[in-house]
């Protein structure tokens, strides 16, 4: 009789509201598939969250580990270190999964090295589905794995060229990984990144596997939080986004491959727009104009002007922004930036 593979579920926790954390852990406890371990890593949480974690340790398959407030990447790396299962799954502490998730997805790992699935968005009492993963299952093997890798720079790649939607492709949640690859190739999260660490982890993993499969099963519930790190205004947004661009430069043949160039420039455009929308300026228009002028001088952004790309890949709005960046048109960019910021 074959033994069901054990799944190690890694959940980083930092100041998660009690009701969210309870829903997350209880969703694992309700799994119809029984061979799992839940690794809860407390990343220097407040007293309420710490108390909740202790109270939730009601099953021998649940372990509680302390980390020292070093962020989600460090916390996940600690979790990987403590795994004992052959399969690894990541789950955010404010999200949850359907009871049949492991029962459905674990058997599919027999013939592939990575499986991904779809999710619901949840906000208050509202729930809606993410775009359908069409032609499910979408399978990547050695001949087309480069498409999946390029989706890690910009998840628009396979959509715009091939009409293929993959759900939250850059996230590590909503997926199962084989621990043997993670350990053999020493794959870990980049602890210097505050966003995009999931995408870089996926790039390092996908480069070392032979097959990945994505299914249109709605099994994860992603809680929409307007106060999350990816949504709020912050002074360090430029440094954060530039660090991610540098990581892409170190992982892809930028300058040599037109598809990689095209995706990288798309991410540069996203970076500039994201920085404009999320940078804190304290209402100072002078500081905002200086920011627009200075952002063009970053090497990662300046590089975009020299790359050969497929301009047909970009939307009309993106082509306009690309032209303004190329010409360093600070006056027009300032105007567009003001519109974007007031509309965000």
Image (cartoon, rainbow, N blue to C red):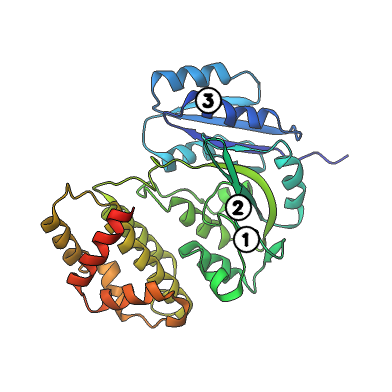
Residue at image location 68% in from the left, 63% down from the top: 134
Residue at image location 51% in from the left, 51% down from the top: 187
Residue underneath mark 3:
19
Describe residue 334's horizontal placement relative to residue 187 as left or right.
left
Q: Residue furthest left?
A: 286
Q: Residues within 10 Å of mark 1 (few under 14, many from 20)?
A: some
SS under mark 3? helix
Residue underneath mark 1:
209
**Residue 319 image offset from top left, x and y in percent:** 37, 77
Q: Which mark is residue 181?
A: 2
SS under mark 2? helix
Marks 2 and 1 close (CB-CB < 8 Å)? yes
The residues bearing labels 2 and 1 have C-alpha atoms spaced at a distance of: 8 Å
Residue at image location 38% in from the left, 83% down from the top: 308
Give residue 227's quadrant in the image.
top left
Q: Earlier in the sequence, mark 1 or mark 3?
A: 3
The residues bearing labels 2 and 3 have C-alpha atoms spaced at a distance of: 35 Å
- From the image, state whether disc 1 or disc 3 is nearer to you: 3
Give residue 38's quadrant in the image.
top right
Q: Earlier in the sequence, mark 2 or mark 3?
A: 3
SS under mark 1? loop
Q: Earlier in the sequence, mark 2 or mark 1?
A: 2
As drawn, 185 above or below 295: above
**Residue 173 image offset from top left, x and y in percent:** 56, 46
Q: Residues within 10 Å of mark 3 (few under 14, many from 20)?
A: few
Marks 2 and 3 close (CB-CB < 8 Å)? no
């Amino acid at each position: 009789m074959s033994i069901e593979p054990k799944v190690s579920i890694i959940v980083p926790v930092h100041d998660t509201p009690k009701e969210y954390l309870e829903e997350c852990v209880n969703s694992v406890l309700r799994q119809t598939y029984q061979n799992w371990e839940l690794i809860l890593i407390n990343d220097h949480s407040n007293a309420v969250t710490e108390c909740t974690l202790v109270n939730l340790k009601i099953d021998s398959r649940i372990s509680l580990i302390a980390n020292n407030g070093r962020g989600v990447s460090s916390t996940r790396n600690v979790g990987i270190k403590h795994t004992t299962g052959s399969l690894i799954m990541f789950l955010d502490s404010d999200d949850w999964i359907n009871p049949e998730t492991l029962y459905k997805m674990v058997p599919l790992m027999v013939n592939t090295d990575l499986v991904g699935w779809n999710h619901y968005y949840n906000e208050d009492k509202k729930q809606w589905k993410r775009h359908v993963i069409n032609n499910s299952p979408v399978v990547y093997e050695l001949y087309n794995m480069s498409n999946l890798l390029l989706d890690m720079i910009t998840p628009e790649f396979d959509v715009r060229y091939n009409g293929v939607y993959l759900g939250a492709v850059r996230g590590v949640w909503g997926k199962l990984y084989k621990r043997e690859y993670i350990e053999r190739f020493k794959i870990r999260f980049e602890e210097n990144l505050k966003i995009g660490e999931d995408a870089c982890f996926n790039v390092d993993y996908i480069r070392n596997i032979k097959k990945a499969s994505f299914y249109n099963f709605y099994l994860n519930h992603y809680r929409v939080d307007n106060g999350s790190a990816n949504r709020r205004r912050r002074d360090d947004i430029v440094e954060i986004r530039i660090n991610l661009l540098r990581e892409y430069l170190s992982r892809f043949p930028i300058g040599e491959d037109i598809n990689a160039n095209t995706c990288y420039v798309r991410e540069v455009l996203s970076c500039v727009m994201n920085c404009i929308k999320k940078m804190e300026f304290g209402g100072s228009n002078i500081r905002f104009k200086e920011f627009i002028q200075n952002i063009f001088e970053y090497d990662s952004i300046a590089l975009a002007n020299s790359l050969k790309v497929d301009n047909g890949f970009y939307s009309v709005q993106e082509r306009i922004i690309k032209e303004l960046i190329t010409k360093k048109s600070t006056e027009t960019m300032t105007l567009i930036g003001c519109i974007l910021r007031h509309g965000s």
